[in-house]
Structure formats: structure tokens, C-alpha cells
Amino acid sequence: MQYFEDLVVGTRSSFGRYEVTRAEVIAFAEKFDPQPFHLSDEAAATTHFGRLSASGWHTCAMTMAMLVENLKAHRQAGLGSPGIDELKWLKPVYPGDVLRCESELLEKRVSASRPEMGIFKTRLTVFNQDDVAVMSYRSNGLIRTRPDEGSVD
């Protein structure tokens, strides 16, 4: 189990693999972001996308799926997140793309009001199969500090 004390600023990691399918792009768009360029190649042809592209919010959801799988493999005393500071959709994500993530721990500190938890900032970048960055964000995470010996965890 990884605790606040185990986090090292500057640490980088790579993880995830997500194959983007046409059916999933359309299904997500129909339910959550029904803009025409997320629903058909014909509608997207007249936009800067040029063809059917995934919603940026779908890209966020695919990224979250990869992040959760990574956290299952590398257990952390995580306490959730109070949010993100910055989100950028850098390039379109298309059906057939294969996504992966790279993260870097930017900073960490113990909470002033809740010393049993730490706060850390991470930059996460999502790349496609051509190593082109398609999305990035800076997030804030909450994590437990290591319990004292003898305490119940």
C-alpha cells in the first residue's frame, strides 16, 4: 500500500492501453455529447475534425478507466480528488486510436487542517498510438499519511 510518505516528487510512470472503437464513440456521444461531429463521419467532414471523433469528455472517461486499472495494480491509500486545475484537449481522438497515459508527480504537501492526509498534484498526459499527446490535465489527489505503528488501518 502506498501512502503519502511514499510519494516522490518528480516520479514519472506510464500505464494503460485503451482501444477506441467507433461503436463506443457513437454510443457515448448519443448519451452524453450529441454534437454532430461525434455522431457521424458526414457531419464531421465539414469540421476541423474531418471525420468522426470522440468527445473530449469521452476521452476523459477512457482515461479514468485506464487510471483506475493502474490503481488496482498499484494500491494507494487514496482518498479521492478535490478536482483538476487544468484540462486540455490537444488533438482529436478517433475510432481506431489506441490510448495510453503518462503521469508525473509535481508536488505534495500535508494538509494543514487534516494532518492525517496529504495533497498531491499530478500532470497526466494521454497519447495515441503515434505518441501524439491528445489530452493533458493537472489534478489534485488526496491520500492518507502512513498510520502510526499500533494504530488500526
Image (tube, helix red, strand yellow):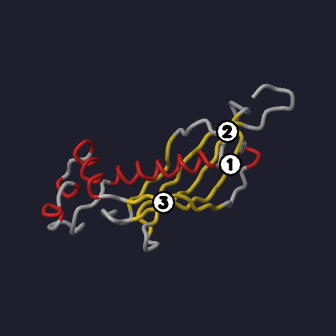
Say what secondary structure mark 2 lies in.
loop
Query: Which percent across, then down, holds residue 73?
Result: 62, 49
Q: Which residue is mark 3?
A: 17
**First in residue order: circle 2 vs circle 1:** 2
Q: Identity of the amino acid at label 2?
A: Ala
Vertical side of 4 occupied by 24: above or below: below
Instruction: Identify the image quadrant of residue 3.
Output: top right
Q: What residue did someone put label 1 on?
A: 108
Q: At 65% across and 42% down in the image, what residue appears?
A: 119
- The relative height of residue 44 versus residue 72 in the rendered view (above or below) is below
Amino acid type for the residue under numbered disc 3? Arg
Q: Earlier in the sequence, mark 1 or mark 3?
A: 3
Q: Quadrant of residue 113?
A: top right
Give the side of residue 84 with respect to residue 31, left or right: right
Closer to the eye: label 2 or 3: 3
Using a 10 Å C-alpha cutoff, classify the residue at mark 1 as few (fewer than 14 neighbours), some (14 to 19) or many (20 or more): some
142 relative to 48 in the view: left or right = right
- Tell me how far mark 2 sits from mark 3, CA to CA: 24 Å
| Residue found at x 54% / y 48% | 69
Relative depth, front residue between 133 and 86: 133
* Residue designated by label 2: 77
- Point out the image quarter for the N terminus: top right
Instruction: Say which of marks 2 and 1 sits in front.
Output: 2
Residue 132 pos. (x, y %):
43, 71
Residue 135 placement: quadrant: bottom left
Q: Position of residue 76 (x, y in %)?
A: 66, 43
What secondary structure is marked by label 1? strand
In the image: residue 93, left or right of residue 11: left
